[in-house]
Image: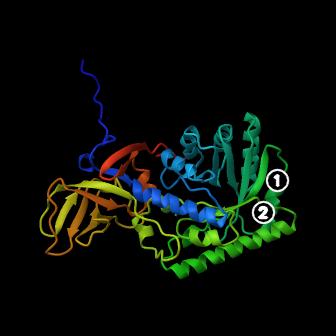
Amino acid sequence: MTSPLQLPPAARPGDALSSIDTPALLLELDAFERNLDRMQAAATAAGVALRPHAKAHKCPAISLAQIQRGAVGICCQKVSEAFPFANAGVQDILISNETVGPAKAALAAELARHCQLTVCVDHESQIADLAAASQAVGSQMALLVEINIGQNRCGVTDAPAVLALIEQIQRHPQLRFKGLQAYLGSIQHVRGHEERRAAAAGAAERTAAVVAALRQAGHACEVITGGGSGTVEFDLASGVYTEVQPGSYIGMDADYGRNDFTGTLHFEHALFLASSVMSVGNGERTVVDAGLKSLTLDSGLPLVWGHGQVSQQLSYSAASDEHGIVQLLSPEAERPALGTQLWLVPGHCDPTFNLHDEVIAVRAGRVEAVWPIAARGLSR
Ligand code: PLP
Ligand code: MN
């Protein structure tokens, strides 16, 4: 009998870039590490804790690199998503999101036996479920009340609503009120630097008003957390947030690349999807082997990368499941030969990471490591 087929890896440490089998997600380590260092230095200088969001990449090796540089822990958006991170040794995890129902509360209570866990709530029944589940397994949990500062997604609307939930939390010795989750995603991609600054100032002001009302009622917030890669420069300077939770800055994406980052903090493209020209095409068109199943289009098309910048010669114009159409932008543009590797900047990093089992960490023309995207697909 023949042995079962083994799929060889797309790349091994030490391989040349040209031998990576495509499509493959790449992290260019020099730029990635500069992004991590810049963010940590800015947070440290501001005296604000950095708790990077792991939903952006779902890769424990990336979180460990952030913690090694001084991050206090991580955020996850889903309870199951946090499991591989806890197993990899991340000790302090915030689920920056609500959980609902006894099954999810049981997952959270189990997770809390393996790390220091904080979860967001915006309703008393979430508190009741988390209390029961924690009691059942003997775990402890901290809770943040999420406030709606303009996202109109989750969160309570005002300080009296927060106070009502604090009262509920205080009935359970295994639960502890820790502060506020105040995130406003819709302003992260406001393009203009000044417009984004003004929007972030509004968010911080609304948050500060709730904090002040809680303080008057005798409740201090140990943690006030929020912010993303688009507003982090302003969040750090706000004097309101004790903690920020940016995610995408690790590698950026084409959508974030359209923001004007002319302030003091900017980040580099470090995340690429390596594709190959699989059919030479004709006229203005060539075809690569990367479509919807290797990058997502929810925030726009990927960009073609060449010589350290967005290509002026080639433009990704359409995707089907496994194919990408690339346009030659001028008659002088050189048609890439069959098999040529083209690097793409994904439109949106978070859902693109979620399509891949591993990310290939590269430096100076070589594969340095292959990192599992261990929380890929974990959306419970
Ligand atoms: N915090 C929360 C609650 C989020 O939903 C997100 C992203 O959507 C982030 C932080 C991180 O944002 P970004 O990846 O844009 O930095
Ligand atoms: Mn995103």
Residue 160 screen position, x and y as percent: 81, 67
Give the x, y percent position of residue 235.
Answer: 62, 70
- The picture quadrant where one finds residue 121 is bottom right
Q: Residue at the spot x=46%, y=46% of the render?
A: 376
The relative height of residue 269 versus residue 81 in the rendered view (above or below) is below
Element under label 2? helix
Compared across the picture, whether 48 is left or right of 40 comes to: right
Read off the residue under disc 1. Answer: 168
Give SS at disc 1.
helix
Q: How many marks?
A: 2
Q: CA distance from mark 2 to mark 1?
A: 10 Å
- Quick check: can you spot residue 269? yes
Identify residue type, mark 1. Gln
Q: Which residue is mark 2?
A: 162
Tell me if residue 117 comes above or below residue 197 in the rendering. Answer: above
Residue 341 left/right relative to 266:
left
Q: Amino acid at mark 2?
A: Val
Task: Give whichever of 77, 161 is nearer the camera.
Answer: 77
Q: Residue at horizontal 67%, vertical 67%?
A: 148
Does residue 150 appear anywhere in the picture?
A: no
User: What is the image's colouring?
Assistant: rainbow
Dividing the picture into quadrants, the one containing residue 196 is: bottom right
Above or below for 360 versus 292 = above
